Image (cartoon, rainbow, N blue to C red):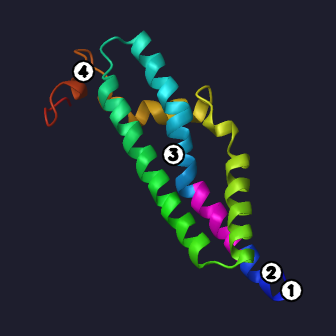
Amino acid sequence: MSFNDLPFFFGSAAGGFVLMAAVGIQAAVALFSSIPLTRRHKETCPDFNTRAAFRRVAQVSSLSIILCAVVTALIIHFGSTAVIAGYGLGFILAFALNLKRMSPNDEQNQKSYEESYADCYPSSDANPDDTAAGGSGS
């Protein structure tokens, strides 16, 4: 790698970091956090719709993984050694920095899970917003 390759190295490192932070981490969180949280919610709330939750986890994971794989394949196919090395470094760095976030015990993941999968819970009579969509509760 020559001195002229350094801007490409650092630019592709930034690109790999941004791609992994924006898209790849979502797939990792879905796989490593949402699946255990879905199983945990099924135990605490038997009427929780695990089928819909697992379907959503599969969609998020597969779309994110496909996007990352396509971009990585294009980088490897068309990029120089400096670009490939920088991209890989950025990708791995983003993954390593977000490792804690992939835990199902992470408070941010639990809040995000509750919001994202709220429609998988059974409707309740206590909250009028849960019953009929479009019903006047206020």
Seen from the viewer's position, the closer of residues 116 and 104 is: 104
In the rendered image, which quarter contains the C terminus? Answer: top left
Q: Secondary structure at mark 4?
A: loop
Q: Which residue appears farthest toward the front when viewing the image?
A: 77
- State how far apart marks 3 and 2 are (Cα): 30 Å
Check if mark 1's residue and mark 2's residue have beta carbons within 8 Å.
yes
Question: Is residue 44 shown in magenta?
Answer: no
Res 123 label: 4
Task: Indicate the position of residue 133 as horizontal and vertical percent values.
Answer: 16, 34
- State how far apart marks 4 and 1 are (Cα): 62 Å
Question: Is residue 17 shown in magenta?
Answer: yes
Mark 3 sits on what residue?
Answer: 27
Side (left or right) of 123 relative to 97: left
- Callout 3 amino acid: Ala
Q: Residues within 10 Å of mark 1 (few under 14, many from 20)?
A: few
Mark 1 sits on what residue?
Answer: 3
Check if mark 3's residue and mark 2's residue have beta carbons within 8 Å.
no
Q: Identify the image quadrant of residue 129.
A: top left
Mark 2 sits on what residue?
Answer: 6
Give whichever of discs 2 and 4 has the lower sequence position. 2
Give whichever of discs 3 and 2 has the lower sequence position. 2
- Write the residue at 75% across / 74% down: 10
- Callout 2 amino acid: Leu
Task: Indicate the position of residue 47 as horizontal and vertical percent values.
Answer: 30, 14
Give whichever of discs 4 and 3 has the lower sequence position. 3
- Write the residue at 51% across / 45% down: 27
- Write the residue at 37% across / 31% down: 54
